[in-house]
Amino acid sequence: MSKESGLIAPHGGQLINRIASEAEKKEFLAQAETLPRVTLDARAQSDLEMIAIGGFSPLKGFMEQSDYDAVVGEMHLSNGLPWAIPVTLPVSEEIAEPLKEGNWVRLDDADGRFIGVLELTQKFHYNKAHEAINVYKTDEEKHPGVKVVYDQGAVNLAGPVWLLERDPHPLFPIYQIDPAASRAAFAERGWKTVVGFQTRNPIHRAHEYIQKCALETVDGLFLHPLVGATKSDDIPADVRMRCYEIMMENYFPKERVILAINPSAMRYAGPREAIFHALIRKNYGCTHFIVGRDHAGVGDYYGTYEAQEMFDNFDPAALGITPMKFEHAFYCKKTEQMATSKTSPSGPEDRVHLSGTKVREMLRNGELPPPQFSRPLVAAELARAMHK
């Protein structure tokens, strides 16, 4: 626990802040036109932001080779601290070649706007197939995470970073609650135990059920939808957030729930990403983290509960956040309520559960998901978005 607030300590013990001070910003801007430039894609920009605000604590920048190798091979940083996903800045050989270690590199967004600085301490080659197999458990390019690895540059740039300025989120400024702010909000409410919930999908009744089951045992619920880069066929972030707003207005106790955005990008790394997501929520101040069916999965690459089993590979004290493991929830016709196989007496014929693919298909055909699957107000919002 953090002595200052009574809250859980950030991963590594200190909440990192890599947002440039006014003096640093002035110095960087003075050299803006003379620094070599690297343009960040959507994932790298999200990673820069997450490092800067402390969401990726204890990282202060993009990983050097010692941390990269340890994470890819053993799921810990070079100092032994648990970490499951490499956070790197890959560029092409052509871009990397003229960059000198020890110098600053200007980081631009896709529009050419100066948004950050990298102190280049190292540049190194890496094995893409090795990263794919270890992190994603497959080398198939049809896996969206693997495709990103294969499409990116062959050289990783490493070193500490600074975010030039913390801008309000263009779509969800009121829900941009960074780790320092979420921790302050938890402390203000007197919450000692907080459960975090990760999602990249619109909320449905199964989500609501496990969230409320978890909320029965802790002080507060931190609803934390991911709004960074996702697959092209995922429901857009603005639609998902409207669904959560509807749930907050109608179905959750407002004084016990906080809705905020997670700016990071999806990796679709299944079990490893479940650990990654848990550590991010630890940095935001959560003591517990919900891990459901096929967390961060895609296709058939991971076992149904493989993400839950991954937590058993780590020392709970070193991980520092408690997973709350839930089975697949469904509507039980026999008991007329949400349930899992642990609580339902019914057989498969009396269980209503639809896949996200099936729901999207129904919405495209002008059909609303049944109320046993989705709250009608949420279903109506999804239908409106689908037929814009």
Image (spheres, rainbow, N blue to C red):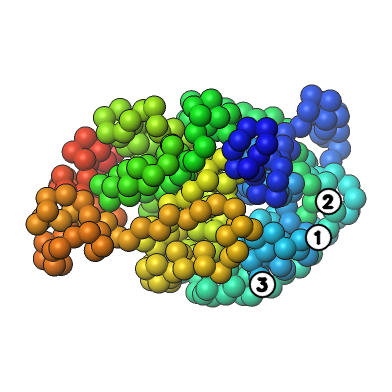
Give how far apart the Cα atoms at labels 1 and 2 are: 8 Å
Image quadrant in which the N terminus is located: top right
User: Mark 1 or mark 3, which is nearer the start of the sequence?
Assistant: 3
- Residue type pointed to by label 1: Lys
For numbered disc 3, what is the local secondary structure? helix
Q: Nearer the viewer, residue 260 or 91?
A: 260
Q: Which residue is tagged 2?
A: 120
Q: Bin the neighbour count of mark 1 within 10 Å (Cα to Cα): few under 14, some 14-19, many 20 and up.
A: many
For numbered disc 2, what is the local secondary structure? loop
Percent coordinates x, y for residue 309 in the rendering:
46, 68
Q: Which residue is tagged 1?
A: 123
Q: What residue sits 39% from the left and 67% below the top?
A: 305
- Residue type pointed to by label 3: Gly
For numbered disc 1, what is the local secondary structure? strand
Q: Bin the neighbour count of mark 3 within 10 Å (Cα to Cα): few under 14, some 14-19, many 20 and up.
A: some
Give how far apart the Cα atoms at labels 3 and 1 are: 19 Å
Cβ atoms under marks 1 and 2 closer than 8 Å: yes
Q: Which residue is tagged 3?
A: 73
Give how far apart the Cα atoms at labels 3 and 2 are: 24 Å
Residue 319 makes an appearance in the image: yes
Query: Against 43, is 302 above or below?
Result: below
